[in-house]
Amino acid sequence: MLNTENLVVRFGGVFALGGVDFAMTKGEVHCLVGPNGAGKSTFFKVVTGQIAPTSGRVSLGGSDITGEGSAQIVRRGIGIKMQTPQLFDDMTVEDTIWLGAYRGRGKAHARRRTAELLDELRLGEVARAEVGKLAHGLRQRVEIASVLAGDPELILLDEPAAGMSDADVDFLAALILRLRGQHSFLVVEHDMRFIRMIADRVTVFHNGKIFLEGRSDAVLSDQGVKDIYLGKGKAHA
Ligand SMILES: Nc1ncnc2c1ncn2[C@@H]1O[C@H](COP(=O)(O)OP(=O)(O)OP(=O)(O)O)[C@@H](O)[C@H]1O
Ligand SMILES: [Mg+2]
């Protein structure tokens, strides 16, 4: 469903991505991990159209989407949740979700979808609250609801568990597990507990390249991967 071929991103003399061939299939929860500076966010920014690659190709369901902007990519059925919430602080929770559901599909649909999502994400009690007044974990939840409102086939999340309490992380993991199958997820994340709960497959980035990719349990127990996290990976000269 989402593929990259020999993706390269250069910032001046730094190769943030040094030729990445990535593939994920429909229906899976795929996590991207790796130590600081590995290239995860750069990869995320390229596939979400926030930066254009220096070279290489990104394709979605067989169509070349290289160089398309975020708005175009969203129209292709991808939901994007950036690391910092992209919400309007003075809008209510309800209106935020409604707006995500409305786009091109009418008011009746938007009303029904909003009610469903307020319930599914347990946001009913704060439906009329302004987004800016909510605690971090709830804001993240509202943003996920607004992404889900567009019914995207593929959802890309950048560090959704960052700064969340354990209870919020558990809630988010359970939500992703319930939605798996209906949606595919690509998640950049540092929180290993969260990754263990949700991931079908894991790709480890290191020095701008894919170090290892495979089933979650195999990758996370790999000695080479553990060494990278301890700063003694082979690719470190
Ligand atoms: N806008 C930029 N200009 C110059 N160098 C950059 C830029 N963005 C990223 N880099 C460099 O590219 C490399 C990869 O960075 P990236 O942010 O993709 O890593 P990351 O895996 O997301 O790290 P973290 O876990 O810390 O978020 C790093 O060496 C970083 O310093
Ligand atoms: Mg990052």
Image (cartoon, helix red, strand yellow):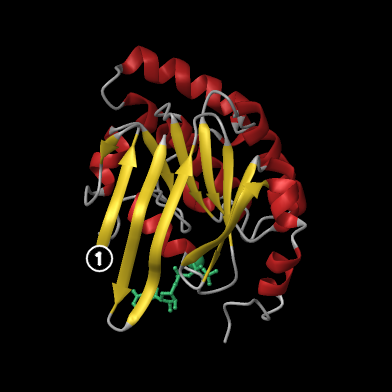
The residue drawn where x is 31% and y is 47% is 58
The residue drawn where x is 29% and y is 17% is 106
How would you rate the neighbour count of disc 1 (Cα within 10 Å): few for under 14, some for 14-19, many for 20 or more? some
Residue 78: which quarter of the image?
Answer: top left
Residue 132 place in picture, x, y as percent: 48, 52
Residue 65 located left or right of residue 60: left
Point out the residue furthest to the bottom here: 237
Identify the amino acid type marked 1: Thr
Residue 77 place in picture, x, y as percent: 35, 31
The answer to whether residue 184 is visible is yes
Image quarter hosting the N terminus: top left
Disc 1 residue lies near ligand 1 with CB under 8 A: no
Image quarter hosting the C terminus: bottom right
Q: Which of the pair 72/22 is nearer the observer?
A: 22
| Residue under pointer 1 | 54
Residue 173 located left or right of residue 111: right
Residue 63 place in picture, x, y as percent: 26, 35
Q: Disc 1 on helix, strand or loop?
A: loop
Residue 179 located left or right of residue 90: right
Q: Which of the pair 148/123 is nearer the observer?
A: 148
